[in-house]
Image (tube, grey):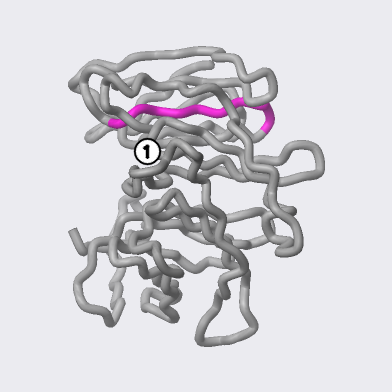
Amino acid sequence: DGVLRLFRLSTANNTFRPATVNLKRKQQNYIAQKWLSSGQIALGTDSGEILIVEHNSTQSVLKLPEPCTAVTCLGESSKGHLIVGSDKASMHLYEASQDVEARFALNTSISLATTNDTGRAGTTITSLSTSMEGNEEVVYAATSDNRLTKVPLGSALEKSCSPEIQPAIPTFLSTKESSCTHSMDTCLWSPLIAVSSSAVPQNNCVQIWNYRTRELEASKRFGSDCPIQAICFHPSSFQLVVGSNDKLIACDL
């Protein structure tokens, strides 16, 4: 709704106080946000812009390459690369730039479309998450047509070679129910990935997959009064936190 709010935690009474934000931009729809390890905030808009916010004001604006028109999700690699998911089933990798004004520069764009995507230009990347597999960092990308794809980050950043893009797990949600992956997270210490369906009563569920064996480890459905908005593994790997409209639910694994 064109609103960005930052809150500062008051250690005196453990309450949140709003912080002043001046983006110096006309009102936009912010679709995604990511707090970067550098302390900056990346904001993605439905007009294809990525705002880099620092010290509560806009420092630079990046633009998606054509023909992509909307940012749908954001991620970050362990080395500080900005990972952007967009429409047209495309993923874009930005690296830190020495240019003080730009802050980031586009390294490469990768299409995750399949041969079956013909005529489905509306396919978008709905969620991104990174994980280490041995010595290699990989990006998991969920798309609106119920696919979860694994992209090796190292080969993707090397423009001279094409990354080996492959399905990470089988199609995990029924397309008959017109749902798609709404949120996703990878576990820090175990080869587990959690995915949630879009917040619709008939398919309001969370599934946990082992991405090495590609087997379903667990599944839980939630009632229509608890639409899932976000999921996140606890750093201990023993719990999964599920965010709804008005509450957080801690689930033991």
Which quadrant would residue 145 be assigned to in this image?
top left
Q: Is residue 182 above or below residue 249?
A: below
Circle 1 sits on which residue?
A: 144
- Quadrant of the frame with the N terminus: bottom left
Q: Position of residue 74 (x, y in %)?
A: 46, 54
Is the residue marked by circle 1 packed among few (<14), some (14-19), or many (20+) residues within 10 Å?
many
Q: Which kind of residue does numbered mark 1 sit on?
A: Ser
User: For the residue labelled by badge 1, is the local secondary structure a helix, a strand or a loop?
Assistant: loop
> In the image, 158: left or right of 106?
right
Q: Position of residue 70 (x, y in %)?
A: 34, 60
Q: Is residue 5 visible?
A: no
> In the image, 109: left or right of 43?
right
As for residue 228 lying within the magenta part, the answer is no
Which segment is the magenta one? Answer: 189-198
Give the residue displayed 35% in from the left and 32% down from the top: 180
Q: Nearer the viewer, residue 120 or 101?
A: 120
Give the residue displayed 73% in from the left and 53% down from the top: 155
Give the residue displayed 37% in from the left and 78% down from the top: 57
As for residue 193 lying within the magenta part, the answer is yes
> In the image, 193: left or right of 213?
left
Q: Is residue 198 above or below residue 161?
A: above
Q: Position of residue 28 (x, y in %)?
A: 23, 68
Which quadrant would residue 97 be assigned to in this image?
bottom right
Dominant SS type (magenta): strand
Q: How many marks?
A: 1
Q: Nearer the viewer, residue 241 or 98?
A: 98
Q: Is residue 197 visible?
A: yes
Give the residue displayed 46% in from the left and 20% down from the top: 207
Furthest residue in direction right, as rendered: 135
Q: Position of residue 24 (x, y in %)?
A: 28, 82
